[in-house]
Amino acid sequence: WAQLMTANAAGARATGSPAAAQLLVADSFRVRVHGGRAEARGFPLHVARFRHSALAAAADAGGPDGFAAGFTTELDLFLETAADRIAAAGAGFPRLELWRDGAGPGTGGGGALAFDLLLRPIPELSGEIALRTAWDASPLPHPERKGPGIAAYAALGAELGAEPLLVDADGVVLEGGTTSLLWWVGDEACYAAPQARVASVTERLVLNALQGLGVRGSSDAATPDELARTEVWALNALHGIRRVTSIDGPELPPRRDASLLLAQTALDACFAPIG
């Protein structure tokens, strides 16, 4: 059923052929080397999120009697092996992946499940990002899982020339194509309701850090126009916290530079050894 780091999945990924393989789950994070050891922010949380999503995706895929126990064993072995390889590779931007081979039309949803570990260098880091609302973006199945939307959101971002700002059918903000969003209402940090979006590890770490600084965080609902009148931060595991400079063109209000610096410093304090 499941195969560890198969060449088939890697080859399909390289060719970008959705008929050959389908990315079901992915999870990536920045790794740095500090004091001679590889470190990541919230690594156990990323592993737990990948594991939860992989089990859910495998259940959706179906399988022969008893596959669940076998898949869980393969999954845990993969995660253990991946942690060792990531730690040995040092600084980078690795991605845990679960693929389904032969998932194109006519397969009946079948195809072997295959794990892969993609070891990548760290892309150029930045502290700012522009957003543009993706009003016509079609909802994807399982929006709570990181992975299935990566290619679609990348194409959408290229089309928009900015990070896609995803909204629901009522025009309420959900998340960015690669980011979770946090915005300020007075001295309170607000975030979108957790339904219908990826549960962001970085968001969780930032909210915990802000709480330690005496800042209250709460779930809220906002439209792109409402966000454009306040300060917004974009959060993800690669860049940490980036200030949103504009939404749909106009620049956002003055920055909370001191708050952002304190939050980023607290977030970086979350780096911990892998393994």
Image (cartoon, rainbow, N blue to C red):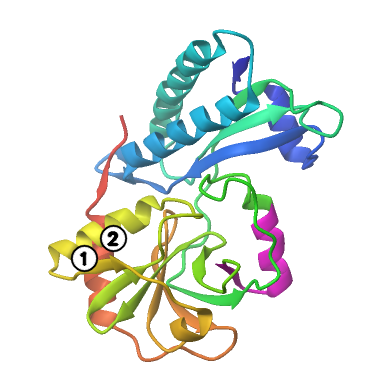
For badge 2, the amino acid type reads: Val
Label 2 secondary element:
helix
Residue 244 in which image quadrant:
bottom left
Q: Say which quadrant the N terminus sits in.
A: top right
Magenta part of the protein: which range? 152-167
- For badge 1, the amino acid type reads Leu
Which residue position is annotated with label 2? 206
Element class at badge 1: helix
State left or right for residue 172 relative to residue 152. Answer: left
Point 87% across, 29% down: residue? 106
Label 1 to label 2: alpha-carbon separation: 6 Å
Total tally of numbered discs in the picture: 2
Q: Does 217 sit above or below residue 238?
A: below
Q: Residues within 10 Å of mark 1 (few under 14, many from 20)?
A: many
Confirm whether the magenta stretch covers residue 135. Answer: no
Q: Is residue 81 above or below residue 118?
A: above
At 36% from the left and 91% from the top, the residue drawn is: 254
156 magenta-colored? yes
Residue in view at x 64 percent, y 31 percent:
99
Residue denoted by label 1: 210
| In this view, 211 is above or below 149 | below
Q: Are marks 1 and 2 in contact (CB under 8 Å)?
A: yes
Q: Quadrant of residue 274?
A: top left
Q: Judge from the rendering whether residue 184 lies leftward or rightward of residue 125; answer left or right.
A: left
